[in-house]
Amino acid sequence: MMRSSSSTSLAALAFAGVSAEKAVVITAPGLTLDISCPAKAHAFGLLKKPDGTPAGSGYQITATRLADDLLTARTAFSTVSDAGGIYHLIGDNGRYRLEVQPPAATGLPRKIVEMDLSASPVEYALPDIQMSPPLEVVGTVHGTPPGGVDGPIAGASVDFYALDATGLHAVYIGSGLTDAQGRYKAVLPDVPQPGAP
């Protein structure tokens, strides 16, 4: 089995995608093997605030193609959302995990969804992504250093995970860093299923 792709120029990045799997039997030297690379997927989507209005500009999108039998994970080209909450993606065919990081000033948690991209030289619309309302979690981290006494721990990272739709894999949904008194604050998505669009 083999796949090929061309990525030697910006034009190739935008238009030449990963080929389909192809079984090949090598029977003699000088075998001619023609490979057809489809167009990359060109797509755009709309980000919405928890109230359903367009999210606005400055939302960072990271689109990572999930690994399959032949390819490891790879990242699609993506743009930051514009004033209307629109973002753009260019990537190979496949299933992607989209991570949306809102601007800090919004006070919103990050959002993670999965979507399929399909080859299309013409840009097409993806399902809307609605940001989750924020849930603020606060607490204090205590610990006992070697030879010391129990007390607050400064500079500790407290990470939060949720199970994905399958219930088998953990998905990072937020974190907080403790201050000098061991206190942290994390903003998490206030929804039953963080991975839902």
Image (cartoon, rainbow, N blue to C red):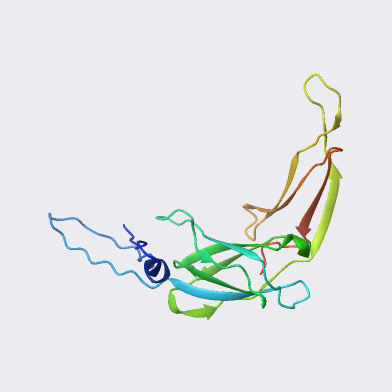
* Quadrant assignment for the C terminus: bottom right
Report the residue that reaches farthest toward the top: 147
The x and y percentages for residue 48 are 70, 74
* Quadrant assignment for the N terminus: bottom left
The residue sitting at 79% across, 25% down in the picture is 145
| Total numbered circles | 0
The residue sitting at 52% across, 75% down in the picture is 43
Is residue 191 in view?
no
- As drawn, is 171 to the left or to the right of 76? right
- In which quadrant of the rendered view does residue 82 lie? bottom right
The x and y percentages for residue 11 are 38, 70
- In which quadrant of the rendered view does residue 53 lie? bottom right
The x and y percentages for residue 56 are 70, 73
The x and y percentages for residue 13 are 41, 66
- In which quadrant of the rendered view does residue 136 lie? bottom right
In front here: 192 or 148?
Answer: 148
Asked if residue 156 is positioned above or below residue 90 in the image, the reply reads above
Report the residue that reaches farthest toward the left: 29
Is residue 165 in view?
yes
- As drawn, is 31 to the left or to the right of 23? left
